[in-house]
Amino acid sequence: MNTDIHRLLDDAFQGIEMTPDAQDLKEEVRANLVARTDELEAAGVAPAEAARRAIAELGDVRALLEETDASPRPSADGYAALQQRHRVRPKPGFVVRAFVWSIAAVAGIAVAILGAAGVWPIPLGAQIGACGFAATALGLLVGDSLSQETTTNHPMPQNRAAGFFLATLLGAFGLGFVALVAFGSMPIWGIVFAALGIIASIILFAFLGATQTNRHKAWTRQIAAAEPPNRFEREPETAARFGIYTAVIWLVTFGVIAVLVFTVGWWWAPVAFLGGIVLMMLVLARMLFAPDKKS
Amino acid sequence: MTQDDAFAADLLRGHTDTIVLGVLRRGDAYGFEIYKAIRDATGGDHEIKEATLYATYRRLEKDGLVESYWGDESQGGRRKYYRITDAGRAVFRGNVAAWTATRRIIDSLLDVKESQQ
């Protein structure tokens, strides 16, 4: 193995302050130089000469680090001004399509509910069809929206947007089956389809979420980087305290829900749920945006 | 380097960001692989300087068009791999569209001049 390269690399980085950034760059350069010298040696160049040539091809690393240090600061313009400058209007075609998808979804849901509730006597197959129609429309709405360019985000690639379409379709269709079973228009075995759809949708959403990469535009990222840290970032212990409070609030809420369900009836459960959310929001407002006591 | 070479190198350098994104679209790669892909594509005639490439990686990463991660090589230094993000793909598509349109304009303009001579 060629060791000259490491000595020459140290020479090239001589006198440069070893910030984490510079260290990172040095390690990256090292691996690339090793690969390049290996290639040169494989072509029959003597090891010492190969190392020397690889370093020479690299050029000046000093200039590189200076260049990034002097990178343009995020401009002093406010968010509103930048947003105005980078404004992207929705395409007229998309607005029309989104409207059509929404109408179709609402129509499908309405037909399915009317059928399932027995108001409008249509066969079970038609009810399922209406659910599928509504689910497809919802999926198209999601997929179409994601593949649009917005002021802050680049459009999502077609394949990934299609994945979100499918996940929404499966999830919504599954929920449709749940509703049909709940209304009693479908026998209890229908729940199998519901579970299949919902589980597949969860798996797909989890996969898409886990493999998601950045979609924000550069100007949004610069703004975010220039943003002063909020209280939870400055005081992690406050964030931890908030986490514990939240856990307590929800444990109590679920306890109250259980009590309500067994005493006054299940339809009171949402009240406790609402109370839990309200309490959590109040605690969040109190803790994240607390008045600064030190000043 | 002749006048023609300098012209070509200049044109190439002006599109370094898009070229790197194009290489990464085929799959994750580390610096030397990207460098080699570009060098091989140009037949070794015009290469984009490595220092230029490092500057490009840093800029692309800052803008969120690529993400980087370290490989797990045990020998000869760990490699820093780059992966294109969804934003990178979108920008790449936009740049390719702009390039196609511009090339058509330049082609037609140059042809007009040629035929007048």
Image: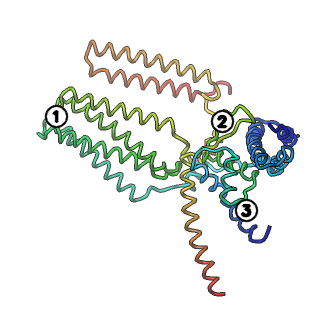
Q: Provide the chain ID for the residue under circle 1.
A: A
> Which marked residue is nearer to the observer: mark 3 or mark 2?
3
Is residue A162 toward the left or the right of residue A283 in the image? left
Label 3: few (<14), some or many (≥20) within 10 Å? few
Q: Which residue is mark 3?
A: B45
Type of amino acid at the residue the image marks with label 1: Ala
**Mark 3 to mark 2 CA distance (whole Å):** 30 Å
Labels 3 and 2 share a subunit: yes
Question: Could you tell me if the residues under marks 3 and 2 are in contact, i.e. CB atoms within 8 Å?
Answer: no
Residue placed at 38% from the left, 44% from the top?
Answer: A165
Percent coordinates x, y for residue A129 in the rendering: 22, 42
Please name whichever residue, A35 or A294, is drawn nearer the observer in this view of the structure.
A35
Please tell me whether residue A211 is drawn above or below residue A283 in the rendered image.
below
Residue placed at 74% from the left, 36% from the top?
Answer: B77
Image quadrant of residue B67? top right
Q: Which mark is residue A117?
A: 1
Type of amino acid at the residue the image marks with label 3: Asp
Q: Which residue is mark 2?
A: B71
> Which marked residue is nearer to the observer: mark 3 or mark 1?
3
Dividing the image into 4 quarters, which one contains the N terminus of chain B? Answer: bottom right
> Which marked residue is nearer to the observer: mark 2 or mark 1?
2
User: Residue placed farthest to the bottom in the image?
Assistant: B117
